[in-house]
Amino acid sequence: MQIPGPYLLFLGDTPHRLDAKTASGILDWRPELCAGQCRLDANTVDLGLPDMSPSAAAAAGAHTLVVGVAAFGGVLDAAWIDTLLAAIRAGLNIASGMHMRLRDNAAIVAAAHEAGVQLFDVRHADRRFDVASGRKRSGYRLLTVGVDCAVGKKYAALAIHRAFATRGIAADFRATGQTGILIAGGGVAIDAVVSDFAAGAAESLSPDNAPDHWDVIEGQGSLFHPAYAGVSLALLHGSQPDALVLCHDTRRTHIDGYPDYPLPTLAECIAANERAARLTNRAARCVAVALNTFGMSETERERAFAATREETGLVVFDPIATSADAVVETLLAFGTNAYDSDQRDVACNQLGRAYNDKKNHCTA
């Protein structure tokens, strides 16, 4: 799936930046692809890009309108259709990561056919997957997991992958959601795979590789989310992670959108994810915590880092505000034998203590 850029990022009419996480992710990691933003009204979230109509974007050289909003349930809002049709008539391709397919809308399909443009349903794989085998694969794997949804699992994985690449270490970012696929140019939207085959899809996403190669796998959902725990479990089993990185936003008190579900403690979350991961890799360990500190002052960020280090004994970082170098150093220190669980435990604990004593490694 090769989606032509540059992109016009469509933000619909959502006032919340969190709901525009697809557009935000593309802008943060592939800014060179972002020609402008298209908003339906002045109350819509503003990403700081030039506001453009579809026709103006096409005239400026954009090739694809990307639906940059992650609507609840993955449904195309009826209020968006006129803008999507206008984009098609202007000659723009349409890319969407919604569960609802563009190709299931007769008006969109007819307009695209007439205009000769392409429709990209990014969330839907173009292949079938096998049931998971549980077979151990060569190479190393890291999976980001979350206390909740939308806490930075994709950003953490991208930051860690970038830290590997900066050091010249063989590693791949493996996208498992629509935004990650738009950033990476490939991947599998795990939450759109039939449940019996989701772990198998995760296996296919991170195949056998060189013994010292790292696959950095984007996590989805949370084991503590009443709606999306299933996709998290499939990734934990199918990716067979050697290392887990827990992602968290310290300002949340309950699962987003579910006020009756308080957040678990970090200890509970780490234990649950390690326990689930050890079904297919008994040496799986949590090695770091990624905090989403967007909007915090430096003092607030350092206070959150210190509290998290004290609570977990692990390396703490922010994928945007700090580097992930400390995570990579930890991984290189213990990545010797994927099944030597005792040795890995000792190494992780030693590295965690070392970085607690050298906080500048975690905050620089």
Image (cartoon, rainbow, N blue to C red):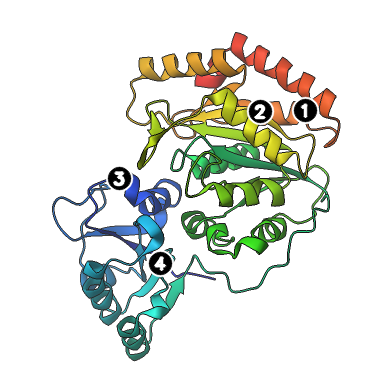
CB atoms of marks 4 and 2 within 8 Å: no
Exactly how many numbered labels are in the figure? 4
Amino acid marked by disc 2: Val
Q: Nearer the viewer, residue 56 or 185?
A: 185
Instruction: Please tell me the numbered disc located at residue 287.
Output: 2
Q: Nearer the viewer, residue 217 or 298?
A: 217
Of the image marks 3 and 4, the number of the one nearer the N terminus? 3
Instruction: Please tell me the numbered disc located at residue 334.
Output: 1
Residue 354 point in image, percent of width and height? 67, 13
Residue 19 point in image, percent of width and height? 33, 49
Of the image marks 4 and 2, the number of the one nearer the N terminus? 4
Compute the Cα span from label 4 to label 2.
Answer: 34 Å
Residue position for label 4: 96
Compute the Cα span from label 3 to label 2.
Answer: 29 Å
**Residue most extreme to the front:** 260
Of the image marks 3 and 2, the number of the one nearer the N terminus? 3
Compute the Cα span from label 1 to label 2.
Answer: 10 Å
CB atoms of marks 3 and 1 within 8 Å: no
Instruction: For residue 70, say whether it is visible.
Output: no
Amino acid marked by disc 4: Ser
Residue position for label 3: 17
Residue 190 point in image, percent of width and height? 57, 58
Relative horizontal placement of residue 51, taking residue 148 as reference (left or right): left
CB atoms of marks 1 and 2 within 8 Å: yes
Residue 31 point in image, percent of width and height? 40, 51
Compute the Cα span from label 3 to label 1.
Answer: 38 Å
Relative horizontal placement of residue 277, taking residue 107 as reference (left or right): right
Q: Nearer the viewer, residue 319 or 5?
A: 319
